[in-house]
Image: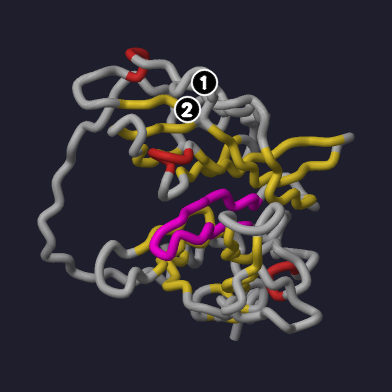
Amino acid sequence: MRGSRFFECTANIGVENVGRGTHKPLGLRDCQRWHGTAFYRRTGRHDPHHSERSAASRPFPQYHQPRGVGEEGLLGLAFHPLYKTNGRSFANYTRRVNGQLQTVIAEYHVSSTDPNKADPWRKKILVIDQPFDNHNGGQLAFVPDKFLYIALGDGGSVGDPLGNGQKLGTLLGKLLRINVDSGTPYVILPDNPFVGNPSARGEIWAYGLRNPWRFSFDRGGTHRLFAGDVGQDNYYEEVDIIRRGRNYGWNIMEGFHCYPRPLQTAT
């Protein structure tokens, strides 16, 4: 891959088998309620894994049955930091309404009659129209400040033709930060960087992203946020340290170069 930078790592890295029997898992999340790990798939199936047990040993229901085709489907799952007591979880999935592709961020609750099942009722937190069929992002996470972070792609197609990455008036091509413990259905945090800007969405934490498919918080120190942003033309696959209010360049910059890259002329 062009433009790659490699760094020596002296850390000791090991591999541990945390489960078996899951078909094509897309991601995993720790679950306090089961004292185990939940694998999830784009088709909407969630499989709990316990130590020395297979996925089939304790079935967990499908919250939703999205279309698991292309880049669509169940793309993200997050358990509330107090899930063990409040039973709240959040999903990022796509759906089609009259042919229009949408991203939905929804809240679910554990069933009041069966603690191993989710109530089929869900509260929609955000519904976002997608202009194309790809670059839907997907990651959800609460750590470290117990607010919900949401990664959204630029809406798709080649080169972000609508320029969503640089438009502060749309949620596409952004990383969002909201409070789901207050408000209906959520509260915009007053210290978010664009609060008070009439031309910007207050939910935005950072922008200029193409498709921040996955992100993670550093478990130590200042809990820095690292995001993987999928590249366009095989020149760059970015891993960005996401900071409050930063512009990560897309679709004006990709990696260390302007986008689109200038044509090379023969001499």
Nearer to the camera, 230 or 57: 57
Residue 225, horizontal then vertical, whole percent? 41, 67
Residue at position x 28%, y 33% in the image: 35
- Using residue 134 as the reference point, say whether residue 26 is left or right of it: left
Does 134 appear above or below 18? Answer: below
Amino acid type at circle 2 is His
Seen as rendered, the residue at the extreme bottom is: 267
Q: Is residue 230 visible?
A: no
Nearer to the camera, 214 or 112: 112
Seen as rendered, the residue at the extreme right is: 98
Q: Quadrant of the C terminus?
A: bottom right
- Using residue 17 as the reference point, say whether residue 242 is left or right of it: right
Q: What span is in magenta?
A: 135-152
Amino acid type at circle 1 is Pro
Does 149 appear above or below 53? Answer: below
Seen as rendered, the residue at the extreme top is: 57
Residue at position x 50%, y 74% in the image: 255
Residue 230, horizontal then vertical, whole percent? 53, 58
The dominant secondary structure in magenta is loop
Does dot 1 land on a helix, a strand or a loop? loop
Q: How many marks?
A: 2
Residue at position x 53%, y 44% in the image: 76
Near mark 1 (Cα within 10 A), the count class, few <14, some 14-19 or many ≥20, is some
Residue 231, horizontal then vertical, whole percent? 54, 61
Q: Quadrant of residue 208?
A: bottom right
Q: For marks 1 and 2, give the one nearer the viewer.
A: 1
* Lower sequence index among marks 1 and 2: 2
Residue bearing the label numbered 1: 61
- Using residue 253 as the reference point, say whether residue 18 is left or right of it: left
Residue 262 drawn in magenta? no
Residue 144 drawn in magenta? yes
- Label at residue 46: 2
